[in-house]
């Protein structure tokens, strides 16, 4: 009678170890060691844990993203931005990777010519759909449990050398049972990114920008990323350009579109990043506060505005460029629409000594508010002492009636 031999149940790893132990006994080779040893070009690109190719364009899976102005531009307003945020993304790309990545190292060397190195603050990191917020401490160690999707714990270590400006993030796969690093093929923390999410990670940080950077200076930054034992991969370079030039703008013309709508023509110019938008301000009544009535994009060279009979309207625009620099000028009427009485410079319905005093104050360049079209009594295009004298004469002439002063509904372009 044959004796039945029992079959020992072993898992895959145990079978490999037994086979290799047998070969070592027969041939004297450490098969398991040889099996684990990395071979040149095996598997084909990339070796070991995956990664991506050297970046040649924006489609590269490893990327760096930096500061964008409110307009979406990479221009940065000089001395107006205190700090900038960067995000470095890494992907175990399906086009190149053959297995999960076990170790990923990111290094970003920050330039002391651009940045205040003492202000570096890591803000967060992501692994697939796992997100960890950080408190800004430059050096940290965190662990992230990737189970049940992946049977691995990820240790994330952040290091920062303030003197050299070198920031480093190290992601390491740990065996949950031993909490030791593992290269088990099933325990890589960053799988091949077949689903578009699980194989992507990124880190973020904030750093202060130096003051007094020269207009037109390019602020550049890029990072190095290493997957397992592969060669470092450089991200594309993120570039911001310092803009220290403020834009200029004016309302060049005002015209009636119909009885109740006027059309304003706007011109603007910026020598660096270009005009982004215009803010339209309107003044209802001479000397009244200015009200912001809307924003126009740089392509809007005309705007229609509804007006009412018997009211004064002053119009002014301020431009903002793509970097966020705002035009530096005082709000004063550039064009206006008004029903006026010549001599009634404060629009109170009377021509008297107060109007003459306001004209003299304006002539002496004192800060006063008055309706210039009404102040130019002799309509010679200037406001001076002659106009003040004529206003006094109008006031003193007992036969001069307010009703006889010419009432005009007109549009005016104010000369600077």
Image (tube, grey):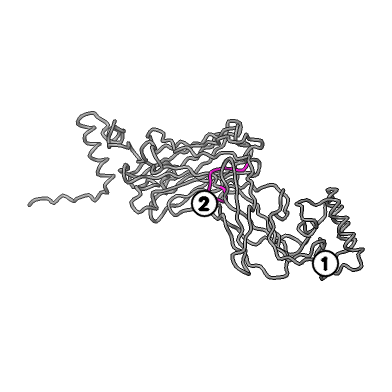
Label 1 vs 2, first from the N-terminus: 2
In the figure, is residue 38 to the left or right of 200? Answer: left
- Looking at the image, which residue sits at the far front? 399
The residue depicted at 24 percent of the width and 32 percent of the height is 24
Q: What's the residue at 71%, 50% (across, down)?
A: 415
Q: Give residue 132's mark.
A: 2
Q: Based on the displayed image, in which of its 4 quarters is residue 137 positioned?
A: top right
Mark 1 vs mark 2, CA separation in Å:
65 Å
Above or below, 312 against 236 in this view is: below
Magenta portion: prevailing SS class: loop
Q: Mark 1: give few (<14), some (14-19) or many (20+) Cα within 10 Å.
A: few
Residue 408 rendering spot, x and y as whole percentages: 73, 65
Viewer-side label of 1, 2: 1
Residue 2 placed where, x, y %?
A: 9, 50
Regarding residue 137, the answer to whether it shows in the image is no
Q: Residue 77: image x %, image y %? A: 62, 43
Membership of 72 in magenta stretch:
yes
Q: Residue at x 68, y 70 (%)?
A: 308
Considering depth in this image, is 391 or 22 the residue closer to the camera?
A: 391
Residue 404 shows in this picture? yes
Task: Report the disc number at residue 348.
Answer: 1
Magenta span covers which residues? 69-77
User: What is the number of callouts on the image?
Assistant: 2
Q: Residue pushed farthest top? A: 28
Q: Is residue 258 left or right of residue 46?
A: right
Q: Secondary structure at mark 1?
A: loop
Could you tell me residue 404's position as x and y percent? 81, 69
Q: Which mark is residue 226?
A: none
Identify the secondary structure beneath mark 2.
strand
């Amino acid at each position: 009678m044959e004796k039945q031999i029992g079959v020992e149940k072993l898992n895959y790893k145990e079978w490999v170890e037994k086979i290799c132990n047998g070969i070592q006994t027969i041939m004297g080779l450490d098969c398991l060691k040889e099996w684990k040893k990395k071979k040149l070009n095996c598997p084909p690109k990339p070796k070991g844990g995956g990664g991506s190719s050297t970046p040649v364009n924006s489609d590269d899976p490893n990327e760096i993203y930096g500061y964008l102005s409110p307009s979406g531009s990479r221009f940065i307003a000089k001395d107006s931005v205190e700090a900038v945020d960067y995000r470095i993304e890494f992907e175990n790309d399906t086009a190149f990777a053959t297995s999960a990545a076990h170790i990923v190292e990111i290094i970003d060397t920050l330039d002391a010519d651009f940045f205040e190195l003492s202000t570096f603050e890591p803000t967060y990191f992501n692994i697939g759909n796992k997100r960890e917020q950080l408190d800004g401490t430059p050096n940290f160690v965190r662990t992230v449990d990737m189970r049940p999707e992946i049977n691995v714990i990820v240790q994330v270590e952040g290091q920062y050398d303030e003197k050299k400006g070198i920031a480093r993030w190290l992601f390491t796969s740990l065996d949950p049972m031993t909490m030791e690093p593992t290269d088990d093929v099933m325990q890589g923390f960053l799988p091949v990114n077949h689903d578009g999410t699980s194989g992507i990670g990124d880190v973020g940080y904030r750093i202060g920008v130096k003051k007094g950077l020269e207009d037109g200076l390019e602020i550049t930054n890029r990072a190095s990323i290493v997957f397992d034992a592969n060669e470092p991969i450089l991200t594309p370079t993120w570039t911001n350009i310092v803009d220290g030039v403020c834009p200029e703008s004016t309302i060049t013309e005002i015209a009636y579109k119909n009885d109740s709508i006027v059309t304003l023509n706007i011109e603007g110019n910026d020598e660096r990043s270009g005009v982004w938008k215009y803010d339209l301000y309107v003044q209802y009544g001479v000397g009244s506060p200015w009200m912001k009535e809307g924003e126009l994009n740089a392509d809007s060279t005309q705007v229609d505005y509804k007006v009412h009979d018997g009211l004064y309207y002053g119009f002014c625009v301020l431009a903002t460029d793509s970097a966020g620099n705002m035009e530096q000028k005082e709000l004063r009427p550039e064009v206006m629409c008004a029903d006026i009485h010549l001599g009634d410079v404060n629009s109170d319905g009377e021509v008297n000594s107060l109007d003459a005093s306001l004209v003299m104050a304006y002539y002496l360049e004192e800060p006063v508010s008055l309706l210039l079209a009404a102040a130019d009594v002799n309509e010679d295009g200037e406001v001076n002492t002659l106009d003040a004298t004529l206003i006094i004469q109008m006031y003193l002439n007992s036969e001069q009636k307010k009703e006889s002063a010419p009432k005009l509904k007109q549009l005016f372009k104010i000369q600077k």
